[in-house]
Image: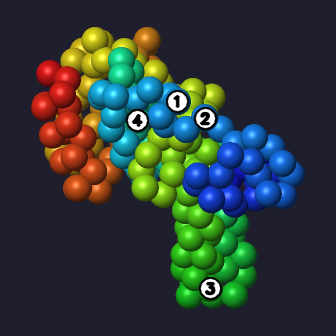
Amino acid sequence: MFCTNCGKQIADDSSFCEKCGNKTSTSSRELNITKNFFYSKEWTKSGGFYFASIPHFDILIIQEYLYLIKFPKSYASTIGLIIGLFFSLIGAVLGVLIGISIEKNKRKEFRSRWINTNGQLTTNEYENNYYFKIPISDLNNNFVLNGKKIKLSYRGEMITLKGNGNEVDRLSQYIKKNIT
């Protein structure tokens, strides 16, 4: 995980940051997470035109809510594309690939604020970063699975996300088993 004060990477079981001395966040045991826990990474927004940097989301289902967590905008792949175009088409492709790698690492670092590398929730920091927070009791009316895409709507706003096949299947199975 990373220190929420200075950003230094520290061991997942640390109580304090070795660089700045900041107390680390609450552990999952202290959060008392006992039921309805599901986490799925790397969903992308479907529909619309994106030059290179596509908005990314994670899905967290915990206790009574489904959280759609949106990551901060990152333009590394767009910048890589533009810079690469000055050199050649191959340069543009390489620029995008490097940018995508940078963006993925930024999402991993951002995600580490609330979930560790073992997939255990370590803090409730996700509460500060959600796009939607849908009560589980409202999920049947606001969630549609359509092939490899899901549609979520809440309070008049709708978003379509696509995930890789495994994540769509995992989410679908979890919802069928634990929610419906």
Residue pointed to by mark 1: 30
Amino acid at circle 3: Gly
Residue pointed to by mark 2: 26
Residue pointed to by mark 3: 91
- Is 101 on the left-hand or right-hand side of 18? left
Q: Secondary structure at mark 2?
A: loop
Q: How many marks?
A: 4
Q: Secondary structure at mark 3?
A: helix
Marks 4 and 1, Cα distance to the nearest angstrom? 18 Å
- Nearer the viewer's eye, disc 1 or disc 3? 1
* Rendered residue at 56%/87% (across/down): 90
Q: Earlier in the sequence, mark 1 or mark 3?
A: 1
Residue 6: image x %, image y %?
Answer: 82, 51
Q: Secondary structure at mark 4?
A: strand
Q: Secondary structure at mark 1?
A: helix
| Quarter of the figure with residue 37 | top left
Marks 1 and 2, Cα distance to the nearest angstrom? 6 Å
Q: Earlier in the sequence, mark 4 or mark 2?
A: 2
Q: Is residue 102 above or below residue 91?
A: above
Label 1, residues with CA under 10 Å away: few <14, some 14-19, many ≥20: few
Label 3, residues with CA under 10 Å away: few <14, some 14-19, many ≥20: some
Q: Earlier in the sequence, mark 3 or mark 2?
A: 2
- Nearer the viewer's eye, disc 3 or disc 2? 2
Amino acid at circle 2: Thr
Residue 34: image x %, image y %?
Answer: 34, 28
Labelled pair 1, 3 in contact (Cβ < 8 Å): no
Amino acid at circle 1: Glu
- Is 85 on the left-hand or right-hand side of 144? right
- Nearer the viewer's eye, disc 4 or disc 2? 2
Marks 4 and 2, Cα distance to the nearest angstrom? 18 Å
Labelled pair 1, 2 in contact (Cβ < 8 Å): yes
* Rendered residue at 58%/54% (across/down): 12
